[in-house]
Amino acid sequence: MVCRLYRPASPAPRRSGRCSTTAPQNSPAYRTAATSAIVAFRRCGDLHAGFNRFHCPDCDHEFLLAFTCQQRGLCASCHQRRTLIEGAFIAGTICAPVPHRHLVLTVPRLIRELFLGDRSLLGHFDHAAHCALIA
């Protein structure tokens, strides 16, 4: 196993790092919640902020997993992980297993005027859409 030296990411290249260091701390728009969210985002994935050590008893391999900020919106990786977990939960427990799908079919703008003029064409459009979906 190759041991690598841990080098924490510098928050300076991030936009939030520049914003939090240049924004006036006493401005009314700079709220406490925003400040704590930015601080948590800057510490997300940093081993200096805390970590869990995992050890494999079979191969004696160890690795460190840094704590995350567990936020939505600001941190893209934490937001994506929570979205996937909640999506799987909703699909597995809340949504009923029914044999139908909800589809939205749109008509291109160039031919919408044809359907406005002759409504009988909508039946042909419906038949064409049905044939396209079952093919």
Image (cartoon, rainbow, N blue to C red):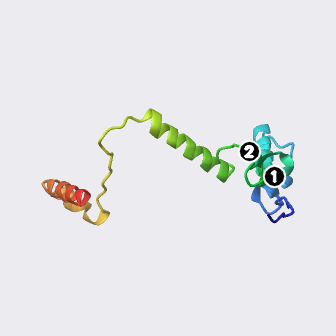
Quadrant placement of the C terminus: bottom left
Q: Residues within 10 Å of mark 2 (few under 14, many from 20)?
A: many
| Left or right: 104 as drawn, with respect to 130 | right
Percent x, y of residue 65: 76, 50
Q: Nearer the viewer, residue 62 or 104?
A: 62
Picture layout, residue 63 above or below residue 40: below
Q: CA distance from mark 2 to mark 1?
A: 10 Å
Judging by the rendered image, the residue that carries numbered circle 1 is: 46
Percent x, y of residue 11: 82, 58
Which residue sits at x=84%, y=60%? 10
Judging by the rendered image, the residue that carries numbered circle 2 is: 69
Percent x, y of residue 124: 15, 58
Identify the amino acid type marked 2: Cys
**Quarter of image, res 1:** bottom right
Q: Nearer the viewer, residue 17 or 113?
A: 17
Which residue sits at x=48%, y=37%? 90
| Left or right: 36 as drawn, with respect to 79 | right
**Quarter of image, res 28:** top right
